[in-house]
């Protein structure tokens, strides 16, 4: 029997070793890279390959793994580490991430690794002295000292210690006698209970271990039967029986020590939850996500010595496109948590995880529909806390999410992939940190995931791959739309839509104002070319405070409910079936369009048809055009603009065609970078160039997000003390600024049209006085020089002051001191007030000065996308205000003004009513304005497209 069982076990070992070598050894890799003692021994080779897979769990780079293989003498010394990394290590990792490790539990790389080390040790002990093997186990496989002795107990022939079968073996006579007697009385069974075998499916393929389990089962059954059925036995017989049991147990203990941990696990009567878990995991692995198969799908640990590379595409998309900050994914074997460090404090706390003995923790909040895991970061030295927490939410209503939680619970670890947002939202790789989950928490998570999957799929575990691949496909458009909402609304939504009744909301808004104030002082110093001592440090400190407060706000349960509700509040921003909101978004370099409108009492989402359009070429051309110098001949500048807009026809046509079919008449656009630099409302919708987007729809406006529109509409409005405020400054007296006369002409026209208008010009038009007056006005008109800047907080409009920094009403100053809840319309009639100089790819909402006014409560802002002439500014102002004083709402007034300019209506000999009034006022300031405007139109036919309107109109 012993020899037969040993033969069965050896057959299993050989099969496992061959399977590992066959599936993991890269065909393109030469065995000459390996030391002869490795390539010539299949058990050693299989152990090496599994070791490479387990090293990936900790996030060690291929170079580090390759160096370890070379230092251990596993590969030949002359093999360069980069060759080992690219030729051996990475191909193994690629296969493991694609298919898992090649044994029953594909997800259990650590289990396979431990098993092969145990088998290798037993194999090696048959050839080498124990002390030599001890050294090899510690150095080759890096087994901790406390575990070496346990592994050294493994044997190639564990069945030499096989305890006797108490039914047929008379060696233990007393126990054998009782067994036979109980059998004769029908109090015991001669065969192993079929239910027991069914409960241990792993024993089916291992008859050798099944035999051990059978004998163990009989031993246990005999003791229970004796206790239950035998009465009044003599002390001598009881002592003999006890001695037989003790001898049997000692022999079984010696056998158990010689078996691998995996083989012992096969004999354990696993709970039903674990059996169902394994069934689901084995089925669900058939579903693959493409990104996880890429070489750069994950980052390596920061201490690995791997060069800093670019952030993997899927992480870039989660953050830039979908607005994710802390999300979970499953990359092959690895549960992955993405963490985004937005400040130095975030980064320091995450880096503190790398410190040996770092104290981190987990909190779990579970309901029937969701499991929320909170990673509690260590408090770094010098930080007074509280500890930062990062949330990871698993929906128990989705098969894919519940399955990912089950996978997390099964492996008991996660790889925390950390990236940092730097500068204007660019991503930098930090690294990958391996985190061990507490065993008790894993059991809790497993129970929650199993309960969810039983509810969602029941016994039909085979349906899991199909459900993971297809669930939510009917909601793809809605998911895409709200991904855009999250990505584009981060800054504005946090400040505008935070509920005032939340405990932390007031503090958060105060912190935000302090940050803006610090940025305003720094911006002023930059504009003056001076260094303000401590300014950057102050901004950095306030950024940390705002982020820490924001994390606390996000963690408030009531705020979470408000945030969830806000996703549905977008309905309130569209009260008719004729209005649509359209997001343009960059997904992995390809443009996607997702739209939302109302159909009856329901909200409708749709992904608009779009041919495979790469943004890379358009993006480069847009940025080149946006950076053209102001002295470039206008015809060349205009020609480049027309070419860019022609290239965008393929983007705009589906919007016009699809929404036109549904009777949509009012369109709100939210472009993606860098398309927000272009006048998309001026794009021709067909190749015949017969109509622009502005002509297809009655109204085309812009807004960062639908939630912003909703937040503005629902904000508390104050009555205005002043109906019209005019702020004008020529730039005269400001160092480095060339004076212009247009603003004063505008101020006179506006004052003539609006009775009782408040006008600030010259020395009165300081940023401080302008902001104070704006807070009490209904309509605000600013005519001055516009100023863009690489630092978006320093962009603004130039008013009166002793220096450029003192005179500029910057975006940061608006955010610090602005309060525009009475303002229905802001007109920024200055150059480039609706654009920016940022080259960052991350979607931002606070890039131009117009967005600062929206963030502080203004309902709508008219701004410009490029330099405008004084004549264009004066004509636009006169026309717009004529419509406003005649009762038009801001959107209609803007639309009618653009209609006049686009149609060249100044060439008509006779104008009646409001237009006659506007033209007369223009003529009083500029008698030959029509001829001059004709000349400018000849230089740039799209002059009218420079004007856009953003917000609620």
Image: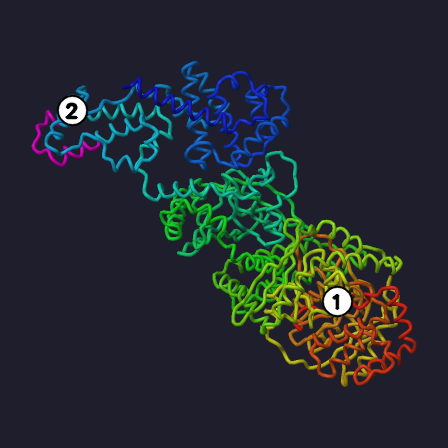
923 or 775, which is in the foreground? 923
The relative height of residue 649 versus residue 829 in the rendered view (above or below) is above
Q: What stretch is highlighted in magenta?
A: 219-238
The relative height of residue 883 versus residue 537 in the rendered view (above or below) is below
> Splitting the image into 4 quarters, where does residue 242 fall?
top left
Where disc 2 sits, the SS reads: helix
Q: Which residue is under mark 2? A: 176
Determine the residue positioned at 42% across, 40% down.
Answer: 282
Residue 286 drawn at (x, y percent):
47, 41
In the rendered image, the residue lying farthest to the front is 688
Q: Is residue 364 left or right of residue 745?
A: left
779 or 460, which is in the foreground? 460
The reply to whether residue 775 is visible in this rendering is: yes
Q: In this view, does 164 lie to the left or right of 255?
A: left
Quarter holding the N terminus is: top left
652 or 945, which is in the foreground? 652
Q: Which residue is under mark 1? A: 691
């Amino acid at each position: 029997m012993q020899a037969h069982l040993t033969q069965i076990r050896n057959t299993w070992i050989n099969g496992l070793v061959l399977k590992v070598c066959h599936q993991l050894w890269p065909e393109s890799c030469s065995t000459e890279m390996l030391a002869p003692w490795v390539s010539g021994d299949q058990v050693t080779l299989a152990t090496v390959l599994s070791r490479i897979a387990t090293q990936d769990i900790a996030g060690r780079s291929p170079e580090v793994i390759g160096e370890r293989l070379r230092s251990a003498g596993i590969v030949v010394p002359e093999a360069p580490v980069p060759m080992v990394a690219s030729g051996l290590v990475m191909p193994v990792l690629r296969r493991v991430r694609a298919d898992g490790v090649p044994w029953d539990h594909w997800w259990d790389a650590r289990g396979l690794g431990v098993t092969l080390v145990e088998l290798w040790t037993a194999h090696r002990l048959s050839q080498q002295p124990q002390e030599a093997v001890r050294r090899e186990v510690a150095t080759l496989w890096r087994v901790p000292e406390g575990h070496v002795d346990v592994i050294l107990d493994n044997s190639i022939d564990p069945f030499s210690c096989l305890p006797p079968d108490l039914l047929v073996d008379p060696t233990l006579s007393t126990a054998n006698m009782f067994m036979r007697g109980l059998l004769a009385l029908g109090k015991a069974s001669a065969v192993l209970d079929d239910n027991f075998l069914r409960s241990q499916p792993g024993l089916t393929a291992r008859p050798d271990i099944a035999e051990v389990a059978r004998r163990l089962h009989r031993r246990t059954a005999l003791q229970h039967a004796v206790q239950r059925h035998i009465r009044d036995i003599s002390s001598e017989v009881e002592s003999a029986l006890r001695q037989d049991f003790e001898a049997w147990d000692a022999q079984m203990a010696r056998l158990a020590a010689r078996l691998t941990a995996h083989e012992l696990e096969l004999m354990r009567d696993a709970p039903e939850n674990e059996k169902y878990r394994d069934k689901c995991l084995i089925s669900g692995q058939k579903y693959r996500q493409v990104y996880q198969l890429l070489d750069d799908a994950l980052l390596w640990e920061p201490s690995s010595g791997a060069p800093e590379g670019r952030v993997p595409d899927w992480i870039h998309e989660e953050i830039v496109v979908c607005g994710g900050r802390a999300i979970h994914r499953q990359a092959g074997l690895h549960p992955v948590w993405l963490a985004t460090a937005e400040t130095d404090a975030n980064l320091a706390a995450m880096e503190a995880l790398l410190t040996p003995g770092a104290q981190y923790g987990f909190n779990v909040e579970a309901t029937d529909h969701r499991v929320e895991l909170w990673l509690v970061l260590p408090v770094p030295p010098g930080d007074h806390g509280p500890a930062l927490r990062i949330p990871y939410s698993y929906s128990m209503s989705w098969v894919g999410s519940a399955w990912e939680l089950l996978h997390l619970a099964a492996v008991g670890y996660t790889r925390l992939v950390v990236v940092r947002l730097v500068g204007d939202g660019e991503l930098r790789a930090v690294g990958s940190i391996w985190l061990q989950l507490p065993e008790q928490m894993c059991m809790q998570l497993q129970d929650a995931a199993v309960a969810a999957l039983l509810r969602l799929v029941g016994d039909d575990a085979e349906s899991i791959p199909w459900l993971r691949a297809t669930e939510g496909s009917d909601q793809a458009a809605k998911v895409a739309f709200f991904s855009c909402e999250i990505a584009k609304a981060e800054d504005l939504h946090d400040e505008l839509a935070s509920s005032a009744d939340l405990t932390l909301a007031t503090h958060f808004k105060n912190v935000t104002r302090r940050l803006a104030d610090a940025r305003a002082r720094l911006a002023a110093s930059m504009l003056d070319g001076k260094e303000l001592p401590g300014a950057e440090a102050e901004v950095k400190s306030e950024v940390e405070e705002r982020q820490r407060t924001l994390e606390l706000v996000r963690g408030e349960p009531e705020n979470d409910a408000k945030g969830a509700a806000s996703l549905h509040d977008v309905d309130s921003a569209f009260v008719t079936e004729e209005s649509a909101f359209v997001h343009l978004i960059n997904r992995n370099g390809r443009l996607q369009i997702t739209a939302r409108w109302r159909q009856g009492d329901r909200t409708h989402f749709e992904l608009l048809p779009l041919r495979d359009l790469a943004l890379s070429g358009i993006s480069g051309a847009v940025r080149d055009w946006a950076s053209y110098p102001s002295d470039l001949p206008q015809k060349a500048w205009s020609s480049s603009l027309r070419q860019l807009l022609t290239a965008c026809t393929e983007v705009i046509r589906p919007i016009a065609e699809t929404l036109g079919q549904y009777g949509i008449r009012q369109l709100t656009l939210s472009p993606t970078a860098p398309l927000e630099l272009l006048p998309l409302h001026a794009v021709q919708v067909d190749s015949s160039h017969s109509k622009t987007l502005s002509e297809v729809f009655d109204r085309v406006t812009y807004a960062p997000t639908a939630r912003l529109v909703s937040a503005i509409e629902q904000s508390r409005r104050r009555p205005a003390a002043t109906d019209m405020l005019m702020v004008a400054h020529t730039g005269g007296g400001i160092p480095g600024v060339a004076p212009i006369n247009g603003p004063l002409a505008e101020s006179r026209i506006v004052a003539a049209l609006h009775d009782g208008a408040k006008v600030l010009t010259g020395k009165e038009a300081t940023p401080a006085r302008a902001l104070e007056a704006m807070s009490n006005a209904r309509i605000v008109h600013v005519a001055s020089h516009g100023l863009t800047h690489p630092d978006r907080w320093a962009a603004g409009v130039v008013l009166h002051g002793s220096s450029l920094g003192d005179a500029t009403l910057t975006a940061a100053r608006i955010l610090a001191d602005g309060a525009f809840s009475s303002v229905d319309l802001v007109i920024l009639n200055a150059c480039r007030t609706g654009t920016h100089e940022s080259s960052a790819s991350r979607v931002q909402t606070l890039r131009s000065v117009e967005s600062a006014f929206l963030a502080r409560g203004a309902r709508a802002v008219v701004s410009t996308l490029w330099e405008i002439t004084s004549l264009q500014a004066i004509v636009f102002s006169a026309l717009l205000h004529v419509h406003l004083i005649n009762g038009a709402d801001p959107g209609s007034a803007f639309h009618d003004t653009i209609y006049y300019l686009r149609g060249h209506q100044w060439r008509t000999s006779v104008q009646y009513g409001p237009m006659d009034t506007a033209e007369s006022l223009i003529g009083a300031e500029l008698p030959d304005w029509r001829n001059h405007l004709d000349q400018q139109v000849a230089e740039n036919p799209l002059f009218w497209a420079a004007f856009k309107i953003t917000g609620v109109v």
